Image: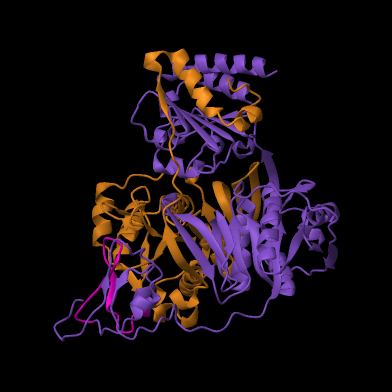
Chain colours: A orange, B purple
Amino acid sequence: MHIVCCLKQVPDTAEVKIDPDTNTLVREGVESILNPYDLVAVEMAVQLKEKHGGHVTAICMGPPQAESVLREALSLGADTPILLSDRAFAGADTLATSYTLARAIRTLNRESEVKLILCGKQAIDGDTAQTGPGIATRMEYSQFSYVTAIESVDPRHNRIRVARKMERGQEILEGELPALLTVELELAVPRRASLPNLMASLRQPIKAWNKDDIGGDVQKLGIKGSPTWVRRIGAPPPRESGPRFAAREGVADAVRQGLNTLLADGKMASKLGLSDG
Amino acid sequence: MAKNSKGIEVAEILTDQCIACQICIAECPVGAIELSPAGVARVDPEICVGCGKCSDVCPVEAVAFDRKKRRKIRKAPKAEAPASENIVAVCIEARGSSAATVSWELVGKARALAAKRGAKVAGLVLGTGAEELAAQAGATGCDEVHLLTHESLGRYVPGLYGYALSELAGKIRPDILLMGATAQGRELAGVVATLLKTGLTADCTGLDIEEETGLLLMTRPTFGGNIMATIFCENHRPQMATVRPKVFPLPAPPENHKWDLVRHDWHPPQVPVPERIEFITDNEMMGIDITEYPVLVVAGKGACSPDAFALLEELADVLGGVVACSRPVVESGLMPYERQVGQTGKTVAPSLYVAVGVSGAIQHRVAIQGAQRIMAVNSEPEAPIFQVADVGIVGEYAQVLPELISQIKARKKNHA
């Protein structure tokens, strides 16, 4: 079974901040990592390969340094790394990204049928969760988002059954292969790469594909193919902090003063059904 | 202004402004710009020909380039936006016999947006036997309700609903299409935007109409909530956005409101459609949607023990709320993921948010921005949660909570 994982290199978002005074990005010490949801997708793909046999291709669209996330996928057991890198891909929003990735997967499909595409539910930098459904739609694959468990896969009869998370519960869905899944963090626990695999992953050549390798309409790539545009960025609206009371100086007093402050405007008091004094 | 060895004045990237959108990289005619390992654009001065295009296209003015006759073009010339109707459409997400609350919140917002541009509000309803839902959409403030029914749409299935909704939107041709950023809405919107080949901005927390252009300005948190980005979609229609629940208030139903019902037929395409085998409604612990409670009592790492939970539950009870938690508590296995507040959990906007032993990392703080009041109890006076708390009590939860509970009970009696 040929499985494709779509990967994204993202900044560790805990580190990216904006200076509220100058409205500029603070980037010191920000590291680039493999999107954590994609890491789970790679782990799942490798587990499925170990169970059913097959081949795992990891693809990543990004600048040359995005190669490092492909090496990480290799160290976990992915077989073929493909880096989609071209100036024409730059500036892509989710519509152009799903087009580019779908073109690449079609190219792979011609050599060996892609039965399963695994994507992270979303990337932690953009949090859009749109690229996966976009690729599935373009490929006309069965689509399953927010997958928390793969209950069964039958590559011979082209069936798959998954559990996925919705607002009010868990949905068990069954459908046909080929399929695209977007995965939640609880789907699998990523393994630690063994030292030999880690060493091997550093030596393996990475295939680099540009716009000519995937064909298609250049007007649909990168910035040209992107309908959305950033107009401005800024810091989230600040929130002011109120007084603090120390329990050390008497817990009953601290709590009383705290509640008085909280209920001072009366509205909160009536909302909670409490007296404000 | 820096010059290169050929004497050309070259562009320079202001690294603390650059958002790594890579638009300049795509637009540079000579390929002089690349993304540095630090994740910002970088100009190779020896390749740069000083044309200034990067400066023209940069959305955040992160390119230092001085040109005497500066011609401001905002982006590469593109076709005009396709013709569309002056309609703000809202996709109404069915939930049992009613709709997800966010759908009604959006109808309210759509009315405000429509008023700014003299547009009509259309409610889009899919399903079988959705007459009742259509009537609710009309009563809530839609000027027209478009009802597309087909036996295959009895309940939401991924893929198929996307085809139905995009066909409906293709007929009505709204200028703006809004959907709730629920699990279903986010998935569905991704499919519809792909089929309609238009732009989609996910998880917005703000929507407005730009006065001079009439365009929809969509504001959303990005980089894990540390940064707000305002996005627009100039040349494609509809302008699509999903919006987080609890961002906009529920509207008051307009009085004497007239609305039209339009029915649509549909022939489903031959696409693979997953079949729903089972739906396991969340059990008691998990069946609670923390976003729907007016009061949340939130356990953090500092109150992550079984004996803390008895106190937290009691506090939540007297306040008419429910217990939620931060990520470390889920990781410890004490509470299910469904109760988690934060970047990887839920965004909440309760009237009162009581954080107990929550340190308040940025990923947690961004998800509670909508809370009306925040009270923090923490033994660590330097905990970042105090920076956003309206009231702070510095002390051990085991000491503070019993006192808090008893004083709240006393105030309840006084109130009654």
- In terms of depth relative to the viewer, which is nearer, B376 or B325? B376
Residue A60 showing in the rendered view: yes
Estimate the x, y position of residue B69 in percent, counting from the top left. Answer: 33, 86
Q: Position of residue B303 (x, y in %)?
A: 44, 24
Q: In this view, does B87 lie to the left or right of B43?
A: right
Q: Quadrant of the N terminus of chain B?
A: bottom left
- Residue A6 horizontal side relative to residue A15, left or right: right
Q: Quadrant of the image for the C terminus of chain B?
A: top right
* Res A178 visible: no
Figure disc tally: 0
Q: Quadrant of residue B315?
A: top right
The reply to whether the magenta stretch includes residue A8 is no
Horizontal arrangement in the rendering, residue B20 relative to residue B307 (left or right): left
Q: In which quarter of the image is residue A269?
A: top right
Magenta highlight range: B27-47
Name the one closer to the observer, B324 or B318.
B318
Q: Is the magenta stretch mostly helix, strand or loop?
A: loop
Q: Which of A84 and B373 is in front in this view?
A: B373
Indicate the position of residue A206 as horizontal and vertical percent values. Answer: 31, 67
Residue drawn at 25 percent across, 81 percent down: B48
Residue A46, compared with residue A64, is above or below; it is above
Relative to residue B166, is residue B125 depicted above or below? above
In the rendered image of this protein, does residue B350 appear above or below residue B64?
above
Give the farthest residue toward the left.
B5
Q: Which of B64 and B299 is in front in this view?
A: B64
Across and down, in percent, residue B356 comes to 46, 27
**What's the residue at 65%, 67% (across, down)?**
B176
